[in-house]
Structure formats: structure tokens, C-alpha cells
Amino acid sequence: MQQQQGGRGFSLIQDSGAYTSSCGYCDGYGSATHGMHAYRLTVYDYQELLDQGWRRSGKFLYKPDNKETCCRQYTIRLDVTQNQPSKAHKRLLRRWEQFLAGQLQHGVSDAEGDLHMADAAQQLQQQAGNSSSGSSQRGPKRTRQGNNAVSSATAADDVAGAASDKQQQQQPGIAAEFIQEEFDLYCKYQMQQHNDSPAELTPSRYRNFLVDTPLIPVPPPAAAAAAAAPPPAAAAAGAADGAAAAAAVPACGYGSFHQQYRLDGKLVAVGVVDVLPRCLSSKYFFWDPDYAWLSLGRYGALREIDWVAQAHAAGASELRYYYLGYYIHTCPKMAYKAEYAPSELLCPQRQVWVGLDATVRAALDAAPYVVLSDLPGVRLAPNLSVPRQLPAAAEAPATAAAQDAAAAAAGVGMPQHLGLQAQLAARQRQRLDAQLLLLLKQPVRWGALRESGMLDGEQVGELEERLAAWLAVVGETAAHLLYATPSDLLSVA
């Protein structure tokens, strides 16, 4: 299989289409989602998909349909370079320092009442790196203090810092393996916090959810390799360029990692994260219910934020965002994510980032579905994963009406929107025909397959309908994805 331009690599997916299922947030049966299975997925493609509202569970990717789903879900992120820790977060970090210094006893509750452990099922986000000294946020170090010791380790040493006594022996950039100690903690957490039955907590389900990943790891480039054998006159410049290239990728590389938190060697929490070119995406966090009083979920999120800030400062200049999963305004278990400020929500309709402020909250209070970017006075930020382009097909009627009104005011009789509609139709046809499919283990463009005569008219119509629906939710990233043809539809002679 050929590499894509620029050495980015290819991703292989199997479209599952749109479906409705039970909702995990309101217990109803109105969750409307589009899904696809990823056999392999580059970190670059996944970054773009995240920026269009997708998320993964194991190797399955899903995107809510906010026009139809019962609980509207908005991708939420934090620019760590603009982070403004709340008073509660600062108190939590001080409280950890006191605990590690032996000044706070196990089980002593916080007098100010705002440090309760957030339910980690809601915190579909969390932990990442234990940062080094000199951190922009104060927190416990990995050394012993008083009667307690804390350590954290990831699948990659550089995400977690120096090794603890029981650190996972994994190399940077390799997805986490099944570890019995982590699985045992996961079972304890799920049973006590979510009332799961032991029959539901099988190793295979755990693997599918938190161990398996489609992400292709990217190790950091070695500065020496980047500057290998340059011409003598360019040796100094080559070495500098190589060092810059190595610094642009965090020391752990890109990929999926497990983050461990330990107290005196005992595993008390695990976070599952994806490190991507522009963000650290928190996937899930589970913890020992015996230590709920330590607010491990919030603490882990603060450490992840700090790790992103340090990676950014160390030279990974594009890596500056912390993705917390989905924000659901109507669900208290998910709305807490707005604590980390200043947060931004992805507008699913316009695909731009919108600052989460009082105006946005009021609008979400008033209506179940809101086009966030249309709210007056909101702060907008461009989406780097969505290039500037023609209006989407759903927006064409409004755009056309505006153009007709302008034409009438100018005394022009010909409706101008016919040109726009033709452009949209031509662009859609071009995207469809250019889409790469995997057929009989070979990549082929849909346009060539459609005209080849290998498929009958019914097959062409049904597959093209599926492709068009998929392209609408995947966007421009489809150009980098290899679409596995559905075996239930095609029977090529």
C-alpha cells in the first residue's frame, strides 16, 4: 500500500452508517450517532476527526448527530497557554501537597466542600503527564514527602517523568498492553462506582474499550538522524534543524498511552490518553474508590493540563490543547468540564470553535439545539482541520436566498444561486469520484469503480448513497481515509 503524500500514511476504516441507540446520559433511547470502525488510523487523521466532532472507543469511532440526538454533545477543549486555574483547583493542588507532606490524614474531607471526586465515567477525559519540577502548576513530585509517596508512569517514560518502582516497561510510542493490575482496579471501580456486574467486566471487553487502539504510533524524530550526513558547509544548520524537528514532537511521540498514579507503590488511578499533533485527548479515567476523598479525577486532569503546557514550552509548539471529550450542558455528570477555563466548544454546524461563556450557557439553557457560532458576540476561533471552502450543502438554501436578494436589489434578473448550486453539485461529484475504496485488497477510486461495469445499477446507487452520507460527516479528512467496501453490499464477479 502506498504512503500518502508527505509520508503521512493511510488510514483504513469500515463505515457503520447512522444508527440510534440507548443513551448513557439520560437513560433514554434517542442517541443518534454515525459510526465507523478503524482498522488503522494515523494520528494526523484522528486529530482532524476530533476537530470535526468524532471520538473513539477502542477502535470504534463515533460522531453524535446533534440535530437528532437526545443529549447534545459538543467537543470541548482548553488552550493550555491561556489556562486560568480556578480557586478550587489551586486548593486541590495545595491539598495534595499537604497530604504528601503528611499534614492531611486519610479520609479528612475538604472543609470548603468543592473537592468531591467527580464521577470518572463522566470524566471521559483525564490524566496524562506527571510533569517535572519548574511546573507552571504546583503539584506533588514523584519523590517521597512525609509519610506518603506519589508516582505516575505512562506507556512512554517521557510522558510520565522518571520511572517508579513498578513502572510499565514499555517503549515510547507503543500502545498500552493488557496489565492485570490495571484491569483489577478497573473492575473495582466499575463495580463500586457504576454498579456493573462481574459478568460484564471481562478482559475482552476491557481490551476492546481501553487497550485496543487503531492509532499508528509516531516516535519522536532523532535530531541526529534528522541531521545525518549533511554537507560539511551545512553541518551546523543541519544539526539545528534536526534538533528543532525533534523538539516539535513531544518526547513520548504520538499515540495512545496509559497513565498510572501510585501512592507508596500502590496503583490508585489509571488514565487513558491519546497524544496527537495538536492536543492531548483524554479518553477515560478509573480510580480506587478507597481514595475518592483525594479527588484523583480532578487532580489527574490538572496534571494533564500541566503536561501539555510543558510539552508546548519544550518545543512542541502546535501541541497546546487539552481535549476533554464531550460537553453535555443538560447532564451534570458532563457539564463539569466547563470548570477548566477558558474552554471552547466545537460548533457542529459551522465547524468553528466558540468560546464557552455566559452567552453560550444561556442559549443552551433556553433551547435543546443551538448553532453556537450564530450567537451574538461570542468569541470564534478558526478550525485548523477544516479548510475554508464553499458553503455546505445544508447552508446552500440560505446562501442562495441571500444572493437572490442581492441580485434583486442590483436589478439583476438571473438568480445567482444557480451558479453556487452547480458548484456545490460539481464539488460533491468530484469528492465522491475521487474517494479511495478498498476492493478485493486493492485501492480503487469510486469514480473508476462506478464506470467499470463491475457493479450493477442497484449496487452503484446504494453504495454511492452510503458514501455521500459518510463524506458529509467525515469532511475533508475523507481524502486521507481508505474506505473498506461493505461485504454485505458488494458481490463482484
Image (cartoon, rainbow, N blue to C red):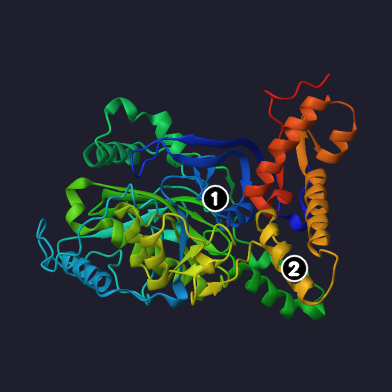
- The structure residue drawn at horizontal position 56% and vertical position 74%, both measured from the top left corner, is 315
Which mark is first along the chain, 2 or 1?
1
Instruction: Please say if 388 is above or below 423.
Output: below
- Residue 164, percent from left and from top: 34, 55
Q: Which of 302 and 354 is in front in this view?
A: 354
- Can residue 357 be seen here? no
Q: Which residue type does callout 1 highlight?
A: Trp
Element class at badge 1:
loop
- The structure residue drawn at horizontal position 48% and vertical position 74%, both measured from the top left corner, is 378
Q: Nearer the viewer, residue 188 or 67?
A: 67
Q: Name the residue under label 2.
A: 403
Crowdedness near tag 2: few (<14), some (14–19) or many (≥20) residues, C-alpha within 10 Å? some
Q: Name the residue under label 1.
A: 54
Question: Dividing the image into 4 quarters, which one contains the C terminus?
Answer: top right
Mark 1–mark 2 distance (CA, rounded to whole Å)? 33 Å
- Quarter assignment of residue 458: top right
Element class at badge 2:
helix
Question: Dividing the image into 4 quarters, which one contains the N terminus?
Answer: top right
Label 1–label 2 contact, CB within 8 A: no
- The structure residue drawn at horizontal position 60% and vertical position 36%, both measured from the top left corner, is 17
Tag count: 2
Which residue is situated farthest in the top direction here?
A: 493
User: In the drawing, does residue 128 fall left or right of residue 87?
Assistant: right
Instruction: Please say if 17 is above or below 41.
Output: above
Instruction: Please say if 32 is above or below 304.
Output: above
Instruction: Please say if 303 is above or below 451.
Output: below
- Residue 444, percent from left and from top: 82, 37
- Residue 140, percent from left and from top: 27, 67
Q: Which residue type does callout 2 highlight?
A: Gln
User: In the drawing, does residue 309 fall left or right of residue 100?
Assistant: right
- Can residue 195 be seen here? yes
